[in-house]
């Protein structure tokens, strides 16, 4: 079966898909042999009478999820992201294999998370100011902040993931650093790393871009594709500048420096500064590299908004075994999810919603908040729907996520939605 032909369960069909093959001969059904588009639920109900599954052509119609990303999904492909269990055991064995469970809800945690994120951004701004003025970074204070971040993310990472959707365009450099730190801690938590390892990783992430502050703004702001060979060589010196500056500080541990020195290396040797490959790159540095790259995809410097989470994950997946470790890429997909908290999505009902909280066991069936009805009209009160409970439409069709939307689609302001959901609790009601 070609990559552009995807097997889909009848319950997972949505309008806009193109059915190219059935699970039985076309001649035994009333459907056109050449295939056809699904226009509405009536078409799906008609197929249901004859088939348990069909194949859709993603070149001619809508795909349920990015086709590349589907290759990581298991038999219940709309509900469980599958990874290689043996590779997971190897990775977790290195990290301590601690199992963390959510001990609080994101709505209870988000108030504290907001304050901690503000502290982290302030700490990052202080780091920037210290470097630019030739002063010393307050490493103990930065370490204290990241340790508090780790404690809260261990309790429930979704609150911080929500906050990562709110982008400050005026402070890209340290906004990127803080967001990347949060992605990295969330992944480390998923891998079962010890608190000590997470503290090392998070401190390294917070300090990782200090070398870039020594680069001229003209180079720092230039699109990577437009840099000349000599400019690229100069840009890559930021790692050297960071290590030199942090060593002078005298309060940064060697294991933290090791993460910073190696997080820009890549599996195939195309990274820098030493062009290391595979096992030569420490695991924590690999986690840091994936987390930083993901944030660059979803929050690029030059655009208002970047790729949707599912598109970014698909991009990462395509780079497995070349730029990034394949097992760690799959683990990152599991840790963050195709639809992380705060993601704007279109449901199979054509309603627009935002992910409130992930279901850790079934990542494609999270809790969502309905924002717009099928005609794109805003609800007067946000409605909470738990897709884990298999919500159904009036005609008996299960409600699923059709696809993710870019931040800001249909005028949905993530800051406004955040304030409404988390600061005005009276605006949420259970969907009936």
Image: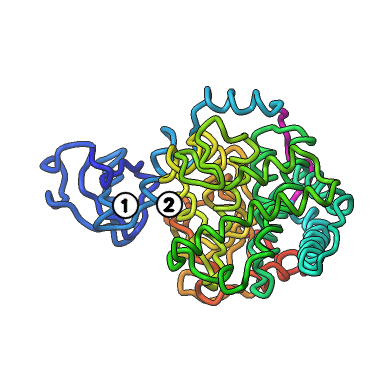
Residue 86 x %, y %: 52, 22
Q: Residue at x 69, y 38 (%)?
A: 189
Q: Residue at x 30, y 45 (%)?
A: 48
Which residue reaches farthest front? 230
- Residue 429 occupies which quadrant of the picture? bottom right
Which image quarter holds the C terminus?
Answer: bottom right
The earlier-in-sequence mark between 2 and 1 is 1
Residue 80 seen by the camera:
no
* Dot 2 and dot 1 residues touching (CB under 8 Å): yes
- Range shown magenta: 98-105
Q: Any magenta on residue 104?
A: yes
Residue 409 x %, y %: 50, 72
Label 2 sits on a secondary structure element that is: loop
Q: Residue at x 71, y 55 (%)?
A: 160
Residue count near mark 2 (Cα–Cα under 10 Å), binned few <14, some 14–19, many ≥20 = some
In front: 22, or 208?
208
The coloring applied to the image is rainbow
Residue count near mark 1 (Cα–Cα under 10 Å), binned few <14, some 14–19, many ≥20 = some
CA–CA distance in space, label 2 to label 1: 9 Å
Q: Is residue 12 above or below residue 369?
A: above
The residue where tag 2 is placed is 397
The overriding secondary structure of the stretch rendered in magenta is loop
Label 1 sits on a secondary structure element that is: helix
The residue where tag 1 is placed is 44
Residue 22 x %, y %: 22, 41
Q: Give the total of numbered labels.
A: 2
Which image quarter holds the N terminus?
Answer: top left
């Amino acid at each position: 079966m070609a990559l552009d032909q995807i097997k889909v369960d009848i319950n997972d069909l949505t309008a806009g898909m193109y059915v190219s093959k059935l699970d039985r001969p076309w001649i035994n059904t009333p459907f056109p042999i050449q295939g056809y588009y699904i226009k509405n639920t009536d078409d799906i109900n008609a197929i249901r009478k004859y088939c348990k599954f069909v194949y859709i052509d993603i070149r001619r119609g809508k795909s349920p999820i990015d086709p590349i990303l589907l290759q990581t999904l298991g038999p219940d492909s709309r509900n469980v992201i599958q990874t290689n269990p043996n590779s997971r055991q190897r990775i977790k064995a290195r990290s301590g294999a601690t199992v963390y469970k959510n001990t609080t809800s994101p709505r209870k945690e988000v108030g504290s998370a907001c304050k901690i994120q503000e502290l982290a951004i302030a700490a990052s701004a202080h780091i920037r100011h210290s470097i630019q003025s030739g002063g010393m970074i307050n490493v103990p204070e930065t370490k204290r902040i990241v340790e508090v971040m780790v404690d809260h993310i261990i309790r429930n990472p979704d609150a911080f993931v929500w906050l990562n959707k709110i982008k400050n365009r005026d402070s890209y450099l340290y906004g990127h650093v803080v967001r990347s730190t949060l992605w990295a801690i969330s992944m480390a938590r998923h891998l079962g790393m010890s608190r000590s390892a997470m503290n090392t990783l998070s401190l390294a992430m917070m300090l990782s871009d200090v070398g870039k502050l020594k680069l001229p703004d003209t180079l720092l702001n230039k699109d990577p594709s437009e840099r000349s060979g000599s400019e690229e060589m100069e840009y890559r010196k930021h790692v050297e500048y960071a290590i030199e500056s942090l060593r002078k500080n005298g309060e940064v541990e060697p294991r933290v420096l090791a993460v910073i020195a190696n997080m820009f290396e890549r599996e195939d040797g195309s990274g820098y500064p030493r062009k290391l490959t595979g096992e030569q790159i420490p695991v924590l540095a690999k986690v840091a590299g994936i987390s930083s790259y993901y944030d660059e995809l979803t929050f690029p410097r030059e655009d208002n908004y970047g790729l949707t989470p599912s598109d970014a994950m698909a991009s990462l997946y395509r780079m497995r075994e070349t730029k990034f470790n394949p097992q760690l890429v799959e683990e990152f997909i599991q840790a963050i999810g195709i639809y992380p908290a705060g993601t704007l999505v279109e449901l199979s009902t054509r309603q627009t919603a935002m992910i409130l909280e992930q279901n850790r066991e079934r990542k494609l069936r999270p809790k969502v908040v309905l924002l717009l009805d099928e005609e794109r009209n805003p609800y007067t009160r946000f409605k909470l729907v738990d897709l884990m409970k298999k919500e159904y439409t009036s005609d008996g069709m299960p409600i699923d996520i059709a696809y993710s939307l870019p931040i800001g689609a249909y005028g949905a302001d993530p800051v406004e939605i955040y304030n409404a959901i988390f600061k005005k609790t009276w605006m949420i009601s259970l969907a009936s």
